[in-house]
Structure formats: structure tokens, C-alpha cells
Image (cartoon, rainbow, N blue to C red):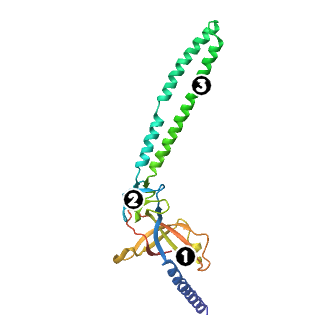
Amino acid sequence: MSNIHSTRSALFCTCAAILTLGAAGPVLSEEIRSCVIVPSAIVDLSVSQPGVVRTVHVGRGDSVVAGDVLIELDDSAISVEIAVAERRATDETQLGGIAQRVEVLEAQLERMKSLTERALARQNDLDRLEDQLLSLYQERDRLIAAKDLAALDLQRVQAQLAQRVLYSPTDGIVTAREVEPGEYASEQRPVLTVAALDPLHVELYLPLTLRDRITVGDEIIVMSDAGGNDGDMELTATVDVIDRVSDAASSTFGVRLTLPNPDLTLPAGVRCRVDI
């Protein structure tokens, strides 16, 4: 009797396990197969200053790295402004003339003080020289301030010149080119779109029943459809983000995985599935 009871218990446990797996399997498979591999960033680039496009250095499908020159706007007008600002910022003519006059007047003032102390000159003459020297000091200070402002103005127009060039903010692939040389570019609309492909992101949604089985930092096997005729590609990604807010309608929560792609061989925008 004891053996029969043990056999029944074992069969019950086995059947329960099979039923549990059978119920859970389709749900997990259905949810996990809905994942997709996407760029880690898609950047719509606009010029910071409007102007006529002089040169476009890249086209759709080109690889770029952060700091690459992508577009140059016409800068002929601002180049003239820079030349004028440099002339003002470096002009020493007036300051040099003031410095010489100050030197002469200071020497005259010292001699006048000596003569006044010996009663060989009038106090009025000494006061007049002091007033002239004070005026020269004020004029010198005004010219120094004007020169400082001219240097700041030079920095301003140089910054405007730098804004006539559009640089890539990230490594990636150009996915759209919206302007050609000679066209007018405005800061109101994108001129290029760059997709960052290293790393890639894997976006998926999991049922709430799996929330306790996944944590940030876990390594997940991703099966990508990008393998084509060679079959699925097996890749290893790391859990980067687990959404704290779930979707009540579908009883799911979002998860983002980070997938290294240093040689940019893995494409984005492909479906995948994961094994958890």
C-alpha cells in the first residue's frame, strides 16, 4: 500500500510539472519573440545657424565617428566680420600714443612739483598738469576697456563661424540626408539623421510573472533573425533597463538590453527572440 501511494504521488508531481511547463511555455515564447534590435540612438541633426549649404561631406549609408565634419555652410560674410574684429582686438595704435603722452606728462609733472616746492612755479600750473594727466589716465582706461570688448567680440564672431560647421555628435551610420549644396538650411528642420549602432539596444516586453527572474546586469542570449540563410545569430546582451512602470492592459513590463557591436556588423531594425 505504501508503494502504491508513493507511485501515485510521483505521478501527480510529474503531471503537475508537465502542466505547469505546458501553460507557461507558450506565454513566455509568445512574449519574448516580440523583441526587436534597434539603434541605441537616432539623432536628427540640424544646423545651429541658418544659411546656405556649401558642402555636404556624407551621404546615406556612410559611417561617421564623433567629431567628423558633416556639413559646412557658406561663411563668406562672417569671415569679413572676423577680419574686422581681429583688427580692432589687435590694434595698439591709440594705446601706444596714450602711453607715450602719459610718459611725457608724468615727467613734466615731476619737474613741476620740484619747481613748485622751490617756489619757482605756480601751484595753478601744477594743478593743470595733474588734471591733464588724470584725463590721460581715464582715456587710457577707456581704450583698454574698448580693446577688451573687441577681444570678446572677436570670440563671438569666431563662435559664430564654428557654428557654420555641423559635426557628428556620435559614432554611427547616416540614415537620411535632407539637403544638397546650394540649398538653404534652417535650424527648424533636420538636415541629416545619424543612427548609433554601437552599442545596439534590444527592446522587449515580458509578462509580469517574469519580473522576479530578471535583474539589471544579467546576460541574456538573443537569437537574431539577421542570420538569413545561415540561420539565427546567437548573441549575448546585458540587461540595462527594467521598466518600473508596467503596462496594465497587457500585464507586461519593458526591458532594454545592451548589445555590443564594435565592428558595426550587426544590423538594426531586425526581430529577435530571447532565452531567459
Q: Amino acid at mark 3?
A: Ser
Within 10 Å of disc 2 (Cα), the crowding (few <14, some 14-19, many 20+) is many
User: Where is residue 22 shown, x and y percent of the image?
Assistant: 53, 86
User: Where is residue 24 shown, x and y percent of the image?
Assistant: 55, 83
Question: Which residue carries the number 2 mark?
Answer: 64
* Residue at 48% from the left image edge and 41% from the top image edge: 154
Question: Which residue carries the number 3 mark?
Answer: 135
Within 10 Å of disc 1 (Cα), the crowding (few <14, some 14-19, many 20+) is many
Label 3: state its secondary structure: helix
Sequence-wise, the earlier of marks 1 and 2 is: 2
Q: Tell me whether the residue at label 1 lies in contact with that at label 3, contact meaning CB atoms closer than 8 angstroms.
A: no
Q: Residue furthest left?
A: 229
Q: CA distance from mark 1 to mark 3?
A: 80 Å
Q: Which mark is residue 206?
A: 1
* Residue at 50% from the left image edge and 61% from the top image edge: 188
Q: CA distance from mark 3 to mark 2?
A: 59 Å
Quadrant showing the N terminus = bottom right
Label 1: state its secondary structure: strand
